[in-house]
Image: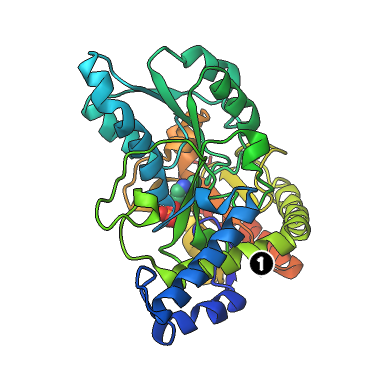
Amino acid sequence: MIYLDHAATTPVAKEVLKAMEPYFSQMYGNASSLHSPGQEARKAMEEARESVAKLINADPDEIVFTSGGTESDNLAINGAGFHVFARFRKEGKKPHIITSRIEHPAILETCRHLEGIGFEVTYLKVDKEGMVDPKELEKAIKKTTILASIMHANNEIGTIEPIGEIAKVCRKHLVLFHTDAVQTFGKLPIDVKKLGIDLLSASGHKLYGPKGVGCLYVRRGVKLAPQAHGGGHEKGIRSGTENIAGIVGFGKACELAMGDMKKESSRLENLRKRLVREVLKMPNSRLNGHPTKRLPGNANFTFDFIEGESLLLRLDSRGIAASTGSACSTKKLAPSHVLTAIGLKVEETHGSLRLTLGRQTKGKDIDFTIKAIREEVEALRKMSPLKR
Ligand SMILES: Cc1ncc(COP(=O)(O)O)c(C=O)c1O
């Protein structure tokens, strides 16, 4: 199998698995227990926290472990929102949040939920390459704006947003800035201090760590209302017995990412450039997202006159795992909100294909994929009622 769906998830690295293994049945203590097994677990967790923090130049006590990207996004938005909600309501005001139209559903659905209970949300437009304009964001800021949440890079089209500039605008207006960095954490250099980020979400399974673990970076001084009440774990922000094995794995994955980020991202970028160059030689095919400011391993194409799902299934039967990058992440056949936001017509969104490269992708895999895409697109077009 040639696995080209690394934006969906990645295999657990063998070093990560090895680091995790003892924490299931040998060193299984509860990190809150005072006995030695408990303290052993706590020590492992705190070491992992250091590795995670180091990757983004945060301090370890600014890392809150969660169950993954979705929970981190929810905690950032709800946590910031509910911290001020009661006060705003007393004053007869609605807290205002700014986000973009191309965010992950973990952000968009959380914002929609908050709108339903008395928040106000602005969903910023993006340009045809998927870029948020920091000037537009600044224009949207009001006296009641408490938070802006703009993703670091988009999971479908790979566009990297100008989060440094956006953070500056937010700081100037005393608005908290959250970024969903699930797709960039461990892939692109991030310095939360230099960038001026207040809150940042990450997920273990996108960087060769396990599923079900992630973190929220919470800049020291930023106040969040807890979203899981209980025993007061994670400084009271996120109660629940810590997933030590998962956290250890996440920490190891961060160490590995730190070691090979530069080399790996330029290797992936070269492979992706070759893939894009060759695929775009086919007529009626386009690249979605920004041509250069994009995730190194992300290619998202639109092929006219065909259905992305049919292409995906044909590629799958040839041993290539891809994604339509459109409709069907949740099995509903609605067009992708990201592709629609960058201006694609509904029929164009249906002809899209996302290929996301990763550590095990080799040059020969790319050559095989280029050939397979050419042949399958051609075959599908021959059958297509849309192509005259
Ligand atoms: C940009 C982005 N945010 C959030 C998530 C959700 O992360 P998790 O799967 O860890 O809940 C994903 C996963 O696809 C993502 O790509």
Identify which residue, 29 or 100, lies in the foreground: 29
Q: Position of residue 79 (x, y in %)?
A: 35, 38
- The answer to whether residue 66 is left or right of residue 254 is left
State left or right for residue 95 relative to residue 190. left
Q: Of helix, strand and loop, which one carries label 1?
A: helix
Query: For mark 1, what is the residue?
Result: 256
Residue 358 at least partly seen: yes
Q: Quadrant of residue 245?
A: bottom left
Q: Give the percent coordinates (x, y) of residue 202.
A: 51, 51
Q: Relative to 181, does residue 90 appear above or below in the rendering?
A: above
The image shows residue 55, relative to residue 47, as above or below, that is above
Question: Do we see residue 307 in this rendering?
Answer: no
- Percent x, y of residue 109: 32, 38
Is 156 on the left or on the right of 160, as rendered?
left
Q: Nearer the viewer, residue 344 or 65?
A: 65
The residue shown at (47%, 35%) is 102
Question: For the point 47% across and 39% down, which residue is it?
Answer: 349
Task: Tell me which amino acid carries mark 1.
Answer: Leu
Q: Position of residue 64 (x, y in %)?
A: 45, 52
In the rendered view of the protein, which quadrant contains the N terminus? bottom right
Q: Which quadrant of the figure has residue 358? A: bottom right
